[in-house]
Image (cartoon, rainbow, N blue to C red):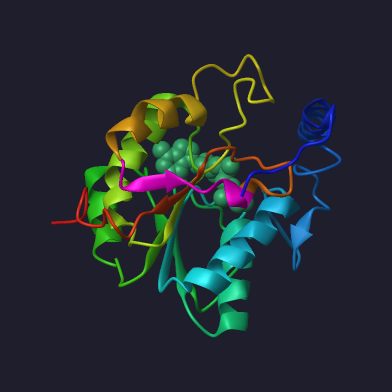
Amino acid sequence: MAWHVPAGGKAITGLFHRMWYHQKQRTWWSEDTTWLGTRVMKSPFDLWIYQEILARVRPDLIIETGTNFGGGAFYLASICDLLDHGRVLTVDIRNRPDLPQHPRITYIEGSSTAPEVVERIRAHAADTTMVILDSSHKCDHVLQELDCYGPMVSPRSYMVVEDTHLNGHPVSPRFGPGPMEALEKWLPAHPEFRVDTQCEKFFMTWHPRGYLQRRVDLAAQGQEA
Ligand SMILES: C[S@@+](CC[C@H](N)C(=O)[O-])C[C@H]1O[C@@H](n2cnc3c(N)ncnc32)[C@H](O)[C@@H]1O
C-alpha cells in the first residue's frame, strides 16, 4: 500500500521524532517509563507493532540481543502469555542482578557475537524463530549480528534491526555508522529478506527500514544448514 503523507508531514514527523528521542529523561530513558514496573527502552509505537507481529506470526522463540533492564524481554513475554504461546531468549554482555523473572524468559550473559554464545542460542532455535537486534548499535557489530542471526529467522517471521534511526535517520546525527549503515551493506546480498514498511505505519518508528521479514518464496536462500 502506498501511504499518503500530507504536505509538511515528513518534517513534522521528523521534528516529533527528534523531540521524543532527545528529551530522553522525560520519555524513553525515564525511570517512570516502564512495562509492568520494569524499565523498557523502546518507543510505545514500536511495542505496539511488536504485539501485532507476535499475534500474526506466533513465534515459538524470540531471540533478543541486548537485555539491559529486561523491559523489552518482559514485554514480549507478557504478550506471549496473552497468546499462550512462545518464549524469549535474551543475551547481554553484562546481566543486571535485578532482571525480571518470568517463566518464558531465559537470560544469557556474553557478547551476542561470541561464537560460543551464538552456538548456545542456535541450539534453542525453534520452528518459528524471530530475532530482535538491540545490543551494540555500532555498524560493525550489527553487521556481525546480521550474519550470525539472519539464518536463524524462519520464513514469514521477522528480524528487527533496532535503532536504524541513529546517525541522522533522523536522530543523533553525530553517532557515526550504525544500524542503518549496516543494513544498507547487508541487505542487497540477502534478497531472502524484505523490508516490511507496513510496520512503519505510525509515522514514528525507531527502526526505519529495520523490520525485515523473511520471504517464503526465497526460503531456501541463506537458511540454516
Ligand atoms: C539498548 S540496550 C537494550 C534494551 C532492551 N532490549 C530493551 O528493550 O529494554 C543495549 C544493551 O546492549 C548491551 N550490549 C552492548 N554490547 C553488547 C554485546 N556485544 N553483546 C550483547 N549485549 C551487548 C548493553 O549492555 C545494553 O544493556
Which residue: 47% across, 27% down?
Answer: 138
- Note whether 111 is above or below 22 in the view shown: below
Q: Which residues are magenta?
A: 191-199
Work out whether residue 154 or residue 166 is closer to the camera in this orientation and state it. Answer: 154
Which residue: 69% across, 25% down?
Answer: 171
Q: Residue furthest left?
A: 225
- Note whether 13 is above or below 194 in the view shown: above
Number of numbered markers: 0
Work out whether residue 154 or residue 43 is closer to the camera in this orientation and state it. Answer: 154
Q: Residue furthest bottom?
A: 84
Which residue: 41% across, 34% down?
Answer: 142
- Residue 181 lies, in percent from the top left, at 46, 24
Which residue: 63% across, 25% down?
Answer: 169
Work out whether residue 27 or residue 13 is closer to the camera in this orientation and state it. Answer: 13
Is residue 69 shown to the viewer in this render? yes
- Note whether 132 is above or below 56 in the view shown: above
Q: Quadrant of the C terminus?
A: bottom left
Q: Quadrant of residue 141?
A: top left
Task: Specify whether 163 is left or right of 133.
Answer: right
Task: Specify whether 38 is left or right of 100.
Answer: right
Q: Quadrant of residue 173?
A: top right
- Residue 187 lies, in percent from the top left, at 36, 35
- Residue 94 lies, in percent from the top left, at 47, 46
Question: Does residue 29 belong to the magenta stretch?
Answer: no
Is residue 93 shown to the viewer in this render? no
Work out whether residue 24 or residue 164 is closer to the camera in this orientation and state it. Answer: 164
Question: Does residue 193 belong to the magenta stretch?
Answer: yes
